Image (tube, rainbow, N blue to C red):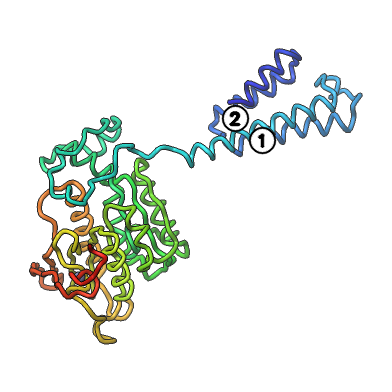
Amino acid sequence: MPVLVFLAVLLLVTASWWLIVYMLMLGGLIWLGLGGWRLALVAALVWAGVLGVVELAPHGAFARLIGWTPRGLAAALVGIVLLFGAEALLRLVRRHTRPLPDRAPGLVPLDGAAAEPVSSTAPVSPPEDDELTRYARHIVLRELGGPGQAALRRARVLVVGAGGLGAPVCLYLAAAGVGRITLADDDRVGLSNLQRQVIFRGTDAGRPKAQAARDAMLALNPHVWVTALERRITDADAGLIAEHDLVIDGTDTFAARQAINAACVAAGVPLIAGAIAQWEGQLTVWDPRRGAPCMACIFPEAPAPGLAPACAEAGVVGPLPGVIGSMMALEAIKIIAGAGDALRGRMLIFDGLYGENRVMKIARRDDCAVCGSGHSRLG
Ligand SMILES: [Zn+2]
């Protein structure tokens, strides 16, 4: 660290015993785990304290013991503060210019290449050993393996909504090592969320959901990058969506879902959508670019008021968003790795009260107002 080099040079020049004591003190603090701004603060305060005493009694016993003039002490203090400041600035710059976790070209090109097996993607640098252990149960899966895990690492996924569905989605994507996750939510954690939104702790109450969820994801897996957006996603966000390979919608109003669907169609990015109410949930992959319907093909108009009440009015059993959200995360992993058959053109309906699953075929509509052939956005 530059400050220690500076002090060592000073020591060589002045041969001052006081500097030896000071450097030993700094070394001890570093050994005790102190670093960053705390270390800088203690270092500056101790030096300033000595300067103060010497300044008060320049010819006193303490000043003679230290052997430095007030001017020399002040000059060195300026040096120490400047060097700590420069170091902090350097760290800040480095943090913001850190390379992506993987510099290989972005996932997929889901455009066209998505259907191809992952083994056809360019070889990527082997993950670090720590990650080999972390993802060992993925890597032994025939359908994922090393190439699938590398694809997850390169993937950029936008999760909209850190609520009941977003909670398991965020946890499983982070745990699975999805390299870049953007999470958008403008809400704050409330006490009534904790019955099902398992990504939050009781102590998160009142915090912005995006921030609290980000902290939980990074605590789970420090190898992933998480960007927290404290805002909603609207139909004007096609540009943001185009920077991602996949969008996962966990919002709970028709208007929000409609806007996200329109932006995903405009950007040509697949959208994994789930919905829950009371004991029942459903999920599908909206993806007109690859032959599947978009949301507007199936739900062209908003339901009549009161027909699709939100969870707050209708209620929802706690584990249900866990079931549907986990399935959404599973679809995401399949799509990213090109494993199995994603729920494109199919809607899975889960009835938790009677323990039943149904899968419905759903088709794209040529006259769809959002993705239909008359519409220019799909080209
Ligand atoms: Zn459509």
Q: Are marks 1 and 2 in contact (CB under 8 Å)?
A: yes
Please indicate whether residue 257 sits to the left or right of residue 68 in the image: left
Q: Is mark 1 within 8 Å of ligand 1?
A: no
User: Where's residue 29, x and y in %?
Assistant: 60, 30
Q: Quadrant of the N terminus?
A: top right
Q: Say which residue appears at 82% left-offset and 19% top-offset.
A: 67
Q: Mark 1 points at which residue?
A: 42
Image quadrant in which you'd find residue 363:
bottom left
Find residue 277 and name its label.
Answer: none
Looking at marks 1 and 2 on the same chain, the residue that comes earlier in the sequence is marked by: 2
Q: Say which residue appears at 8% left-offset and 68% top-offset.
A: 361
Which kind of residue does numbered mark 1 sit on? Answer: Val
Element type at marker 2? helix
Q: In which quarter of the image is the C terminus?
A: bottom left
Which kind of residue does numbered mark 2 sit on? Answer: Leu
Q: Say which residue appears at 48% left-offset and 42% top-offset.
A: 96
Q: Which residue lies furthest to the bottom in this view?
A: 305
User: Where's residue 300, x and y in %?
Assistant: 22, 78
Work out whether residue 196 can be spotted.
no
Image quadrant in which you'd find residue 150:
top left
Q: Name the residue under label 2.
A: 29
Q: Say which residue appears at 23% left-offset and 70% top-offset.
A: 375
* Vertical side of 344 occupied by 257: above or below: below
User: Where's residue 2, x and y in %?
Assistant: 61, 25
User: Where's residue 191, x and y in %?
Assistant: 41, 68
Please indicate whether residue 90 sits to the left or right of residue 323 in the image: right
